[in-house]
Amino acid sequence: MTPVELSRTVLHAVRCAVDEGQLSVVVPERVVVSEPGAGGCGEYATNVALQLARAAGKPPRTVAEILRPRLIAADGIEDVVVTGPGFLNFRLDRGVDPLQDLVREIRAQGQRYGHGGALAGQVLALRVPYEVRAEVVADAVVRIVATQGGRATVEHGEPVDLRPVPAFEDPAPLGPDAARWALLHPAPHDRPRITADHLVQREGNPLFRVRYAHARVRSLGRGAARLGFAAEPGPLNTTEADTAAVTPALHTPLADYPRILTAAATHRAPDRLARHLVTVADAVLPFLTCVLPIGEEKPSAAHRARLALAEAAGTVLAGGLSLLGIDAPEHL
């Protein structure tokens, strides 16, 4: 069960509790599911009970206990534990591998993975100054808002409601991709650096790491095809120590991508997406060394599973770069 699926399961439990008269609240449009915090347990947790408590007129723990039996009954959930003031902590069915489920979900949805309806039916009118960074940010916002079912329009004139700190220099000499990255990656209150560092192919350049990670994934796919195998989700068959390192390092940023897209759309902040792509790239690059067979090793189910995980990360990187208006290269 992926975090997105678990979020839907929690929403369904809330709706059932409302329909049966145990809770009197407006069912939220979405529920955030994340890794448990201090004092938590299991694979995932949510604070939905704390969010609903005031409207329900009940203590958060009471709301959590109302939802708990409905959640335990859901497929893929082994147990639900209430901790602290009312956090719901989930332990998934041990027969279910959340990483495999996540890879299957990304493969099924492709670059539409992370798209949702958080802004369904909403129209955002952006008013920006005649300034290059504002124009580029607005263009990215239009793309990102569309992923959440909304629509954004761009106008010029006062009062301006989207005014990131402009760049001192003209970014055009960097070329279209590096120029867009230089303007989109910093937070809106930070002045962008327009330097040749964005063009250097080295680890210190975040744009290079993101595009290089995508190109490496595509290269591995071509290499696997030459060896006669293709990606297929399944157990990675890494050692216990490797699994403990790989699973959260890759699973967390891939699973968090839908939340990041929603936040970037809601807050009109493409910089959040840009920085998250760096996180995904930094997580997947060390993993790529174990994807293809080495030496006389024959391709196995584990290699197919590792390639599927790598390609899932590549899909997220390509989709995110596309939303920023930046090319995701096949070769680099």
Image: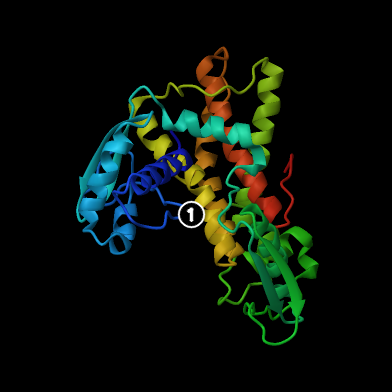
Where is residue 308? Give x, y as percent.
57, 28
Q: Nearer the viewer, residue 242 or 258?
A: 258
In x, y percent, where is residue 108?
61, 32
Image colouring:
rainbow
Q: Could you tell me the amino acid type at mark 1?
A: Glu
**x, y percentage for residue 21?**
31, 49
Q: Secondary structure at mark 1?
A: loop
> In what quadrant of the picture does the N terminus appear?
top left
Q: Position of residue 59 (x, y in %)?
A: 21, 58
Give the residue displayed 60% in from the left and 67% down from the top. Answer: 268
**In-front residue for pair 40/179:** 40
Vertical position of residue 209 compared to residue 76: above or below: below
Quadrant where the C terminus sits is top right
Task: Residue at 68%, 14% (x, y): give it.
Answer: 228
Q: Is residue 163 above or below residue 306?
A: below
Task: Count all numbered tags in the image, as a single digit.
Answer: 1
Q: Name the side, left or right, on which 130 lies relative to 3.
A: right
Disc 1 packing (10 Å; few <14; some 14–19; many ≥20): few
Note whether residue 322 is visible.
yes
Q: Which residue is mark 1?
A: 29
In the displayed image of the protein, which residue is found farthest to the bottom?
A: 158
Q: Is residue 247 above or below residue 184?
A: above
Of residue 262 and residue 25, the one placed in the foreground of this image is 25
- Identify the residue at image location x=58%, y=57%: 273
The answer to whether residue 47 is seen in the rendering is no
Name the residue rendered at 37%, 24% in the picture: 239
Q: Quadrant of residue 131?
A: bottom right
Q: Residue 134, located in which quarter of the rendered image?
A: bottom right
Q: Nearer the viewer, residue 76 or 169?
A: 76
